[in-house]
Amino acid sequence: MKHYDLVIVGGGPAGLAAAVAARDNGIDDILILERDNKLGGILNQCIHNGFGLHTFKEELTGPEYASRFIQQVLERGIDYKMNTMVMDISPEKVVTAMNATDGMFTIPAKAVILAMGCRERSRGALNIPGYRPAGIFSAGTAQRLVNMEGQMPGKKVVILGSGDIGLIMARRMTLEGAKVEVVAELMPYSGGLKRNIVQCLQDFDIPLKLSHTVVNIEGKERVEAVTIAKVGPDRRPIPGTEERYECDTLLLSCGLIPENELSKGSGVTLNPVTSGPVVNDALETSVEGIFACGNVLHVHDLVDFVSQEAANAGAYAARYIRQGEKTDVRTVPVRGIDGVRYTVPSTIRPEEMQDTVTVRFRVGDVYRDSAVVTCIDGREISRRRKKVFAPGEMEQVILKKEDLADAKIGEITIRIEKEA
Amino acid sequence: MYDVAIIGAGVVGSAIARELARYRVKACVIEREEDVCSGTSKANSAIVHAGFDAHPGSLKAKYNVEGSKMMEKLSEELDFPYKKNGSLVVCTKDQDRNSLEGLLLQGRENGVEGLRILEKEELETMEPNLSEDVTCALYAPTGAICCPFQMTIAFAENAADNGISFFMNTEVDQVERVGDHYEIKTKAKENSTGSQIAGEVLQARAVVNAAGVYADVINNMVSERKLHITPRRGQYELLDKAVGDHVSHTVFQLPTKMGKGVLVTPTVHGNLLVGPTAEDVDDKEGTNTTGEGLESLGAMSARSVRNVPLRQVITSFAGLRAHEDGNDFVIGEAEDAKNFYNAAGIESPGLSSAPAIGVALATEIGEKLGLEKNPSFEGKRKGILNPSALSLEERNALIRKQPAYGQIICRCENVTEGEIVDAITRTLGARSLDGVKRRTRAGMGRCQAGFCSPRVMELLEKHAGLSPYEVTKNGGKGVLVYGQNKEI
């Protein structure tokens, strides 16, 4: 198989935006490999609106948002292969893939962008006890069945987890005629966006029970009932608080996990907090010439941020292909502390970075009347106040090159601080 | 009139059916569930025990050792995964080494080959993740792991290809001696779409009772030698392949007053398996896991293996062992019911023993019924092709001929459309998501069918001729979708 300068693994929002940016930064020889039978990734099943407010200043549906990027890819004549599964990525950036027409083939590439997205945490991974009947779906699987196959997976539904897909599906199932009994959330706060709680639950009078979890699933063939219970501060069920809901369906929206099995094979170092690769300011992983963006890097709340991040990855990959990489450059670590769970990127190269670098992160709890404070070796360089910081919403800090000129800088820290 | 009717298409019933197929015989297997391998056979430790566990002289000891010796050749003949990874029974510092020595002697008496006791130093290189408290271990080089699904399916498929009939979704209601034969009444049943299927009456000269946890109920219909089976629940956690090499041998614990302990083992597919608990339950359908049960596995497994990465769990499940009060297998013709043959009380080491039980019962039945040998019996069976076992050239040649082998459906386990279509269209093909899963591993991986289930549903519709509303997870009324949007 032909050699490519840049191979992009995944044709969802991250892969598409990365491809467009790489082409616009002078790389002609680009191939996108997509496992599904269309470009656009998970956006194709997200038929609700609310996409693109940042990128296009208008409210688009998922497929509309995807189509804008697909159009840009097509206009630029970027190569892509669909129904193609990447089987392996070597540290030398040889990509092995397979499809029904080409068989199994290898492509040597100068650079690779990881854009494989994420998967949903399953019932098994959550270790929910009970029987294992039909009727237990991850929210995304239910979304695919309803929105792409036009088939209803349930009539009477309990949802565990208040992640965005679960909230969206509570509304969607209701609109299609199902009764959503309750949404239970293990944590004392929701994992989803505020706007989704209002528009998808409150507007439809669907109760959200925080600090609750599923403790039993009944039914041998199909779900017949689900029991939820209140949990204490240790997140363990409190005996005596059980409530049994008769239902035929349990949807799970309990977190997304970046899909990095391929990344591991290529030798990329992963961050245990995000389950995504550790990257520098160029979104380059620990393996030279392998970049990462989108939900494979860390789980985003808004696709607009995915597109922005992916465009950066595409531009940096283009620069790498054109110029190669300088070794022995100064590297400054970025650390999240006091409520900041992680940062992407986790290192900055002050001499190599653009004038500014956007550092994205999530907080570990709900913080009210607080500020995000950035320090260099303990010296505060920026502070931004906010009424509420919530784990469901991604936050960002912009670092300026000019602040990092001093060669003796040890580390950059980002923390949440309570304000009076 | 059938010569033989076998009740239960688990590993034992299927093994007996396959061995019976060596005779000119009109035989059938009656199975309550929609697929073979749907009860105890699908939810166990997937271990081929070496055979040191059971008391010398017991049927468990006899069939275990015989079955274990047959297994490797059988796995080649019937093409199912089997790996002789060796097993260890570990003794910790608070335990009596004499019990381990006792186990060694018992194993030798049972005829287990190659047993020896290993000391701490040797164990440290052999299995570095053993708990620090482990002082010595009994090593059984003939201990092995296998795929219980594929093993059972292989037996059943091979039996069916050699002329044995299988009736799925057929539950026995009554077995009665009438003159010189038996009448087996089956229950009426409602299918996934709600239509009634009437019960019927089958006649057979001989009946084999391989009904798992229900074997006492079936036996007690015809024999005054009553059996009593207690379902003994075992809960397990299956961990991600990423941690499948945490141990390479099957690590058992030396039994204590508190119980048999749990095992930690790699599976033949490369996952790590931890379990089982042991709880006697009343409900023969009690295959549910419990919060307490799953939680107990952490502390229990830590006794033998350190840092078991339980956070990497991808699924948990429970199976019921058919524990008979006599604490041994009950095998052979019932004393007071001519031509009624039991394969009852088949708890551990049932999987290991199944091949030998199959031979023993088929031989006994063949003789008693005066069956002739079947000259056209073909004992070789080819399983579903595993493309990843092919060379690159072979794989590409296959894809050129059959492009479906180039299309991945299950991305976690890399299962292709070609394999799934084969699983659906071959003898006794899959009719449900779990049927496809047990045959191909599609949906068995870390996303637990999140991505592939809509695709597999489509393939079941297309190749099994099912409507979307007939596709189930695991038979019965376990449909996956109820109707089109806005139409439910």
Image (tube, rainbow, N blue to C red):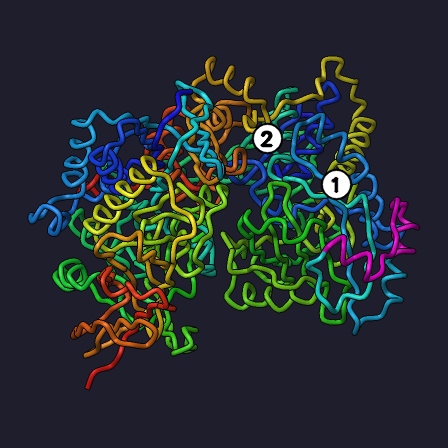
Q: Is residue B458 above or below residue B49?
A: above
Q: Is residue A146 visible?
A: no
Of circles 2 and 1, the one toward us is: 1
Q: Residues within 10 Å of mark 2 (few under 14, many from 20)?
A: some
Task: Name the residue located 45 percent from the left edge and 23 percent from the top edge.
Answer: A105
The label shown at residue B84 is 1
List x then y, in percent, for residue B60: 80, 49
Q: Is residue B185 visible?
A: yes
Q: CA distance from mark 2 to mark 1?
A: 42 Å
Task: Name the residue located 26 percent from the left edge and 50 percent from the top edge.
Answer: A155
In the visual, does B345 lie left or right of A217?
right
Q: Quadrant of residue B2?
A: top right
Please state the extent of the stretch shown in magenta in the rendering.
Answer: B104-127
> Subunit of mark 1?
B
> Subunit of mark 2?
B
Task: Name the residue located 13 percent from the left edge and 59 percent from the top edge.
Answer: A199
Q: Residue A77 magenta-drawn?
A: no
Which quarter of the figure is the N terminus of chain B placed in? Answer: top right
Which residue occupies the foreground of this view, A273 or A268?
A: A268
Q: Circle 2 sits in a helix, a strand or a loop, which is it?
A: strand
In the visual, does B114 lie left or right of B211?
right
Task: Name the residue located 76 percent from the left edge and 30 percent from the top edge.
Answer: B73
Extreme residue toward the bottom, this view: A420
Amino acid type at circle 2 is: Leu
Which residue occupies the foreground of this view, B334 or B306?
A: B306
Please name the residue that numbered disc 2 is placed on. B202
Amino acid type at circle 1 is: Lys
Which residue occupies the foreground of this view, B214 or A272?
A: A272
In the visual, does B27 lie left or right of A392?
right
Which residue occupies the foreground of this view, B472 or B123?
A: B123
Q: Circle 1 sits in a helix, a strand or a loop, which is it?
A: loop
Q: Quadrant of residue B385?
A: top right
